[in-house]
Amino acid sequence: MKLGDRVLLTSFPGKGFVQELAARVAEGAIVVLGPRESLYEARKECAGLTHVLLVEGSRDEIPWAEAWFDAVLDSQPDAPTAEMLRVLRPGGRILALALPGESGSADGPQMG
């Protein structure tokens, strides 16, 4: 990831991961999707991260403009949804995001 990238996370992987990613794209933007009930806690955890926005949505319903994101981080990158492809800019990338508790993941979220 580059400093000015615009990144979409299709789920909230946890505060530590978002903070690390926010440092890597310090001049960009990060949009994290999730259900309304999980966003309340996520907002508290991400307070102070001024270029991180938490938005109600899912990988199947992304309330965002077409071709806006440079990268999409998703737990199923080999099966992107039409919505993920719609919001990804030409030449953008869909990357794997392994969340804790998913098969093959380590203790924390990983990007690959």
Image (cartoon, rainbow, N blue to C red):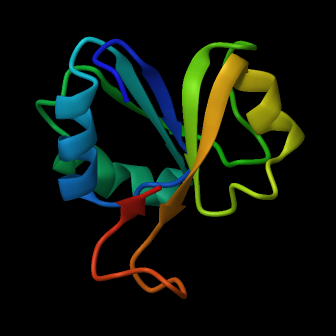
Q: Give the camera-side residue of 10 and 72.
A: 72
At which x and y percent is residue 79?
A: 82, 57
**Quadrant in the picture for residue 108:** bottom left
In this view of the protein, which residue sits in the foreground, 65 or 17?
17
17 relative to 7 in the view: left or right: left
Q: How many marks?
A: 0
Q: Which residue is most to the left? A: 48
Residue 98 horizontal/vertical position (percent) = 48, 68
Q: Residue shown at 21%/20% (left/top)? A: 26
- Which residue does the image show at 64% across and 24% down from the upper left? 92
Residue in the image at 26% along x and 54% along y: 17
48 displayed left or right of 74: left
Q: Quadrant of residue 41?
A: bottom left
Q: Which residue shows up at 27% across the image and 46% down it?
A: 18
Q: Is residue 50 left or right of residue 28?
A: left
**Quick one: quadrant of the N terminus?**
top left
Percent x, y of residue 111: 42, 55
Residue extending farthest right: 82
Q: For this view, does 103 lie left or right of residue 57?
A: left
Q: Is residue 98 above or below residue 16?
A: below
